[in-house]
Amino acid sequence: MRFKQGCKMLWLALLAFALDRVTKLWSLRLEGASEAVPGLLNFQPVRNYGAAFGMLAGRNALLIALVLLLCAAIAFALFRYPRMPGLARAGLWLVCAGGLSNLYDRLRYGYVIDFLEFDFIRFPVFNVADICVVAGCALAFIALLRADGGKKHV
């Protein structure tokens, strides 16, 4: 029973992982930057040797260990708590998929492939896996707020 419940929404993680892989492979074929949506979004392939905002650059072993530890903790939670709300489950699967896809890059290339760049604001170049991690965290947080019933604690 726990295994079946733990695997609920695994399809979401597989889809997110596949979408990130396909878009990264596509971005490797780009020759320099290109304007995707004028004034909004550019495709700018870059090599990211760090984590978010370039933190821990050159510390691949540490980043790999952190991702593996995080994904193990997520897997434990997904399979340990079969009655976890669907929104939280979806969020955790997205975080895991994004982390594992960037981990794949680190193991295969020694860096993460980033290629999405906002044109209207200074923000680091990112990828679909990064979007999955952020969206997954947001979904899990919303589920946590909803599970508490919106009650204020003093």
Image: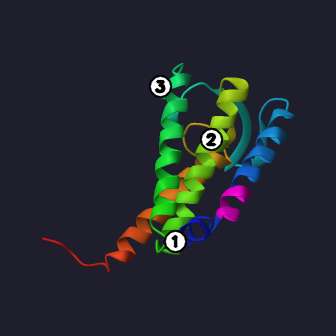
* Quadrant of the frame with the C terminus: bottom left
State which tag comes first along the sequence, 1 or 3. Answer: 3
Q: Is residue 13 above or below residue 87?
A: above
Position of residue 45 in the picture relative to residue 111 (left or right): right
User: Which residue is labeled 1 in the image?
Assistant: 87
Specify the amino acid type for callout 2. Phe
- Residue 31: give x, y in percent of width and height: 85, 30
Look at the image and say whether residue 14 sits in the magenta stretch: yes
Residue in the picture at 53% in, 54% down: 75
Residue in the picture at 17% in, 72% down: 153
**How many other residues sit within 10 Å of disc 2, few (<14), some (14-19) or many (≥20)?**
many
Residue in the picture at 46% in, 62% down: 80
Give the SS element for disc 2. Answer: loop
Residue 131 seen in this snapshot: no
Give the SS element for disc 1. Answer: helix
Residue in the picture at 56% in, 73% down: 1
**How many other residues sit within 10 Å of disc 3, few (<14), some (14-19) or many (≥20)?**
few
Identify the disc placed on residue 56.
3
User: Which residue is labeled 2 in the image?
Assistant: 126
- Residue 129: give x, y in percent of width and height: 64, 47
State the CA–CA distance, disc 1 to disc 3. 31 Å
State which tag comes first along the sequence, 2 or 3. Answer: 3
Specify the amino acid type for callout 1. Leu
- Residue 104: give x, y in percent of width and height: 68, 36
